[in-house]
Image: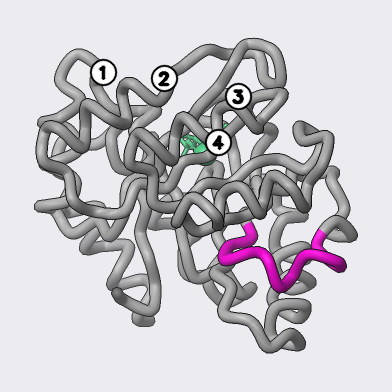
Amino acid sequence: MNNFIIAPSILSADFARLGEEVDQVLEAGADIIHFDVMDNHYVPNLTIGPMVCKALRKHGVTADIDVHLMVKPVDRMIGEFIEAGASIITFHPEASEHIDRSLQMIRDGGCKAGLVFNPATPLHYLKHVMDKIDMVLLMSVNPGFGGQSFIPGTLDKLREARALIDASDYDIRLEVDGGVSEKNIAEIARAGADTFVAGSAIYGKPDYKAVIDMMRKELAS
Ligand code: DX5
Ligand code: ZN
């Protein structure tokens, strides 16, 4: 896997042609697929669930599927997504009654586990579970919708999260989600992110390869 991971969010894909949209973005050079699960309860929107994840696996998708759970409660969905072929499962600490238990369920199911932090959620939740996570995901918008603008304060929070990760002995990815595009990806990487979710910036353009190439060029600059 590359040092920098580009994770297109299928939230902005054409759901009527989802398998094809996933194939195309992977052919265009994406590393993994970001899969947004919203429940109209924890967040004000409703998207896709484990059946769709399973359908993508059946369609032949072998790339890692990065499941971002924006649901409350989280535990039942964890089991269903493990069954459905998820590779990485992340959830918001506010949405779990027992964070340590939820993380353990994910790892016990053979998936990588991560915590997601909303723009105003402090990183304190990380302190006692660093040994149980593979990914920290910082939201750079309030969760619920694609196409929002990157919240600039995320850059400082990324630096803070990067320092915590580097000070630990663990191999933990630092992912950022919301308003990421070829225009700001270099600055976001300099703040410490190594995994970049982009929905509208990729699926909103006609040529996925051109955008992903441009993102890689920016990351190499
Ligand atoms: C927002 C989702 C994001 C969303 C990002 O709640 O978690 O993954 O798809 O979309 P863009 O890249 O358009 O901001
Ligand atoms: Zn997401």
The kind of residue on which mark 4 rests is Ile
Q: CA distance from mark 4 to mark 2?
A: 14 Å
Compared to residue 207, the image places residue 75 above or below, namely: above
User: Residue drawn at (61%, 47%), measured in percent from left and top?
Assistant: 105
Crowding at dot 3, Cα within 10 Å, few <14 / some 14-19 / many 20+, comes out as some
**Image position of 187 (left or right of 210):** right
Which element is circle 1 on? helix
Percent of width and height locating residue 28: 13, 53
> Disc 4 marks which residue?
78
Q: Are marks 1 and 4 in contact (CB under 8 Å)?
A: no
> Disc 1 marks which residue?
15
Check the picture and name the quadrant holding the N terminus. Answer: bottom left
Compared to residue 137, the image places residue 45 above or below, namely: above
Which element is circle 4 on? helix
Q: CA distance from mark 2 to mark 1?
A: 10 Å
Q: Earlier in the sequence, mark 1 or mark 4?
A: 1
- Disc 3 CB within 8 Å of nearest ligand 1 atom: yes
Crowding at dot 1, Cα within 10 Å, few <14 / some 14-19 / many 20+, comes out as few
The kind of residue on which mark 1 rests is Phe
* Foreground: disc 4 or disc 3: 4
The residue segment tinted magenta is 126-136
- In the rendered structure, find residue 144 and report the number of the disc placed on it: 3
Check the picture and name the quadrant holding the C terminus. Answer: bottom left
The kind of residue on which mark 3 rests is Gly
Crowding at dot 4, Cα within 10 Å, few <14 / some 14-19 / many 20+, comes out as many
Q: Are marks 2 and 1 in contact (CB under 8 Å)?
A: yes
> Disc 2 marks which residue?
48
Q: CA distance from mark 4 to mark 3?
A: 19 Å
Which element is circle 2 on? loop
Q: Earlier in the sequence, mark 3 or mark 2?
A: 2
